[in-house]
Amino acid sequence: MSSKNPFEHPEYNERNPFSDTNQIQADVPLTEHTDKAELGQDYTSYTQYDDSQSSSVFDNNASGPSAAGAEDPKLAAKAAELRRREEELAAREREILAAQAEADRVRTQGKNNFPKFYPLIYMSIPAEIPKAHQSTVLFLYNLWLALLGTLGINFLACLLMLIVGIPNGAADLGVSLGYCFTITLASFLLWYRPVYNAFMKEMSLYYYFYFIFNGFHIAFAFYMALGFPSTGSAGLINMIQVFNNHHIFPGILCIIATILWLIQGTAGLWMYRKVHIHYQAQGHTFNQAKAQIASSAVRNEAVRNAAWNAATNRV
């Protein structure tokens, strides 16, 4: 039996097993089992594949810039269209948000309803005033409406005084006409609206606005009831003068005007006391009113500063 290893290759015995394997593989000769034709075929296919791939890559690189240049106008047009649609969507979104904010305000507060002929503000005693104080605020509102009627009757009486020839009738008519506008606006802004807000928000500051300006209104009502000549009043003194000249109908209007001014003063004084009792029961103080004035001033200053900064940054 032969001791020679059939799987042994004579070239392997002469090599260092720790030498470079790549060098070994390169030095190993082709055996008779290697199909040279097959090896040549593989090499040829590899070179053909490599050449085809290389040519396709070069072809793509050569044709790429021209194709991209041809598609640039189309891409630019599509991008412009997308930007236009985005702007339209953004504008539509802003409109929807604004409409939603207005709907929320109307749902929580309601639409402006005062005055009826040209609504500027929202005012609803059942919706905004606590139920326990609705009757008080409603009475004050009716008292303010009665003031408008009193001003109208007083103006008509002064007009008749001028027509029948009462001295200083022209001055009384002019002043009474001015009262119809100034007193109407001032009374609403200076004492009715503050007392409305006072009962709605329970803020000391609004109560003090009411106490100060309604006090002036009460004094004005008693002053108008006296009816001094040339003061725009058809009160007591002018009424006597009209009856002395035997003018019955103008005298009756003067009586009505005098009674209405007395009602304004007396009812206003009674409601003044009632509101003051409520003010004390709620524990409001003058120090609270001063603190609310200070906080309001600080808040307004902050708002002005923010508006100024926004304007300057925009510029």
Image (cartoon, helix red, strand yellow):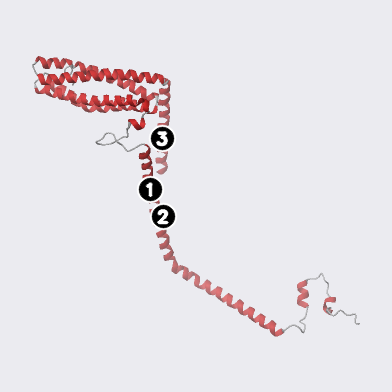
Q: As shown in the figure, which amino acid type bears the numbered disc 3? A: Val
Above or below, 179 against 72 in this view is: above
Q: Quadrant of residue 238?
A: top left
Q: As shown in the figure, which amino acid type bears the numbered disc 2? A: Glu
Residue 184 horizontal/vertical position (percent): 25, 27
Q: Nearer the viewer, residue 120 or 113?
A: 113
Q: Earlier in the sequence, mark 3 or mark 1?
A: 1
Mark number displayed over residue 55: none
Q: CA distance from mark 3 to mark 2?
A: 33 Å
Q: Nearer the viewer, mark 3 or mark 1?
A: 1
Residue appearing at x 36%, y 22% in the figure: 208
Residue appearing at x 25%, y 20% in the figure: 264
Residue appearing at x 42%, y 65% in the figure: 74
* Category of crowding for the residue at label 3, using alpha-carbon neighbours closer than 10 angstroms: few (below 14), some (14–19), many (at least 20): few
* Category of crowding for the residue at label 2, using alpha-carbon neighbours closer than 10 angstroms: few (below 14), some (14–19), many (at least 20): few
Instruction: Kindly state the secondary structure of the residue where label 3 is placed.
Output: helix
Q: CA distance from mark 3 to mark 1?
A: 27 Å
> Which residue, given by chain and number where applicable, does mark 1 sit on?
96
Q: Quadrant of residue 241?
A: top left
Mark number displayed over residue 303: 3
Q: CA distance from mark 1 to mark 2?
A: 15 Å
CB of mark 3 within 8 Å of CB of mark 1?
no
* Category of crowding for the residue at label 1, using alpha-carbon neighbours closer than 10 angstroms: few (below 14), some (14–19), many (at least 20): few
Q: As shown in the figure, which amino acid type bears the numbered disc 1? A: Ile
Instruction: Kindly state the secondary structure of the residue where label 1 is placed.
Output: helix
> Which residue, given by chain and number where applicable, does mark 2 sit on?
86
Q: Earlier in the sequence, mark 3 or mark 2?
A: 2
Q: Nearer the viewer, residue 11 or 268?
A: 268
